Image (cartoon, rainbow, N blue to C red):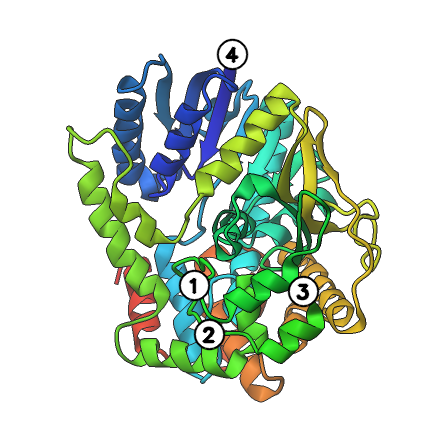
Amino acid sequence: MVKIATIGGGSSYTPELMEGFIKRYEQLPIKEIWFTDIQAGKEKLEIIGEMAQRMWDASPYEVKIHTTLDRAEALTNADFVTTQFRVGFLNARIKDERIPLSYGMLGQETNGAGGILKAFRTIPVMLDIVEDMKKYCPRAWLINFTNPSGMVTEAVVRYGKWEKVIGLCNIPLIATMEEPGLIDKQQKELVYQFAGLNHFHWHKVFDLQGNNVTRRILKEMMEKDAGLPKNIFSVPFFEEQLDNINMIPCGYHRYYYRQEEMLSHSLKEYQTIGTRGEQVKETESQLFELYKNPELHVKPEQLAKRGGAYYSDAACATIAAIHSNSQTQIVVSTINRGAVPDLPADCVVEVSANIGSTGAIPQAFGCFNAPEKGWLQLMKNMELAICEAAVTGNYGLALQSFIMNPLIPSGATAKRVLDELLIAHQSYLPQFEATIRELEAQGVEVKDEVSRQIMLEEQGG
């Protein structure tokens, strides 16, 4: 019988996770699930705990839900640890989005300046969790869904020295679920090959006879909805570019291949209805009101607006595959081990892999053509710089990360945005404390009024 600990248990996504576990109980016999969170998330944690218990009580299975603010208690003797937390909650995401946009620069949760700051806040917390796992559940697998998932997984392996970790994302799963219908196929009739980095991968598709059907899907994608997640604005790729690549880009490639249009859309929302984070905050508030209903024992339809489609399928299928040693093919972030020859063997990549009791065995993809190879090597080395800066608090390396990022125009404005983001998130960046004190002494202040108001609320003002 399996014990699962979920860090960030008060997340609005948790009912989705429970639904996935209930569907797979016969392959994954769970005895107990422990949700843990921080003091500031206590109310949501309790609401989610009661909602999750109702979901299990409505199922044929006897599974006990526990909630605790004591991480050690949740981790003790766990078989699997899932992570789905957001340091600073949604207010942090809103600052990540609004501060860059106030300077006409893309603000996004996992890309550009916002994605870098999220990594700075998240990686030290994840490394603390790994140290606790070494004490309380040294045989457990860490299944990470916390963004930026690829960089977090990289840091766990590189700095946490913990290889029993698999990073997950729902974007590849969305592709495998939505694309077959574009060419009148079912998912089981196609074979997928993914390779790249989290939120920066490409994939090829073959039929069961080995014929490459990637071009057929690309052609249909130019005319039909390709099943993008809720958080990505649908700007079509250039057909000529896709024809040259002959692979299907991740949905997030729009931020790089169509940066001008994606920035324009983000600026329009920033100036009118609010950023994606502000919209999600409203959706989440509505979800928690629903979760309070003592009669509710199924995942509400409104959760689909949150942008995490198939989240539970990715997480629960991975855990079930490890538990049963099923060697199921799943797209994961894991150690490269030569699957992508254009990147170092010891770095973390996102690839198709066979998942079993020994974890992920990545499938060889081969070398990329020059344009994709160039992108990939730039992005991976930027990720490595971000991870090191997150661990060390090295301001010069943090600035290097900003200058390397293709979504951040280099120059004085890039430095200004970095400085404001450091000040805005100072409660969650102890590694940068000395730098932040120097910036404040220089008179650096946050320009965006909404972000300033959030800071005042966080400081009790």
Write the residue at 33% across / 49% down: 304
* Mark sitting earlier along the chain (2/4): 4
CA distance for labels 1 and 4:
42 Å
Q: Nearer the viewer, residue 301 or 430?
A: 301
Other-residue count near label 4 (Cα within 10 Å), few / some / many at <14 / 14–19 / ≥20: few
Q: Which mark is residue 394?
A: 3
Mark pair 1, 3: CA separation: 43 Å
Residue 425 at x, y = what percent? 45, 63
Question: Between marks 2 and 3, how big is the CA–CA gap?
Answer: 36 Å
Q: Which mark is residue 1?
A: 4
Query: Hey, what amino acid is under mark 4?
Result: Met
Vertically, is 288 above or below 257? above
Closer to the chain start, of discs 1 and 3, is 1
Task: State the image coordinates of residue 274 (x, y, percent, origin top left).
Answer: 29, 71
- In the figure, residue 292 lies in which quadrant? top left
Depth check, front residue: 98 or 392? 98
Binning the other alpha carbons within 10 Å of mark 1 as few (below 14), some (14 to 19) or many (20 upward) gives: few
Where is residue 43 shown, x and y percent of the image?
A: 26, 38
| Contact between labelled residues 3 and 4, with CB atoms less than 8 Å apart | no
Q: Is residue 44 left or right of residue 70?
A: left
Secondary structure of the residue carrying numbered label 3: loop
**SS of the residue at dot 4?**
loop
Q: CB of mark 1 within 8 Å of CB of mark 4?
A: no
Disc 2 crowd rating (10 Å Cα; few below 14, some 14-19, many 20+) is: some
How far apart marks 1 and 2 lie (CA) works out to 11 Å
Kindly report which numbered mark, 1 or 2, lies closer to the viewer in this rendering: 1
Q: Is residue 51 above or below residue 363?
A: above
Q: Residue 441 or 429: which is nearer the viewer?
A: 429
Q: Residue at x 76, y 71 (%)?
A: 374
In the rendering, which numbered label is found on residue 225?
A: 1
Position of residue 403 measured from the top left corner of the image (x, y, whole percent): 65, 78
Dot 4 or dot 3, earlier in sequence: 4
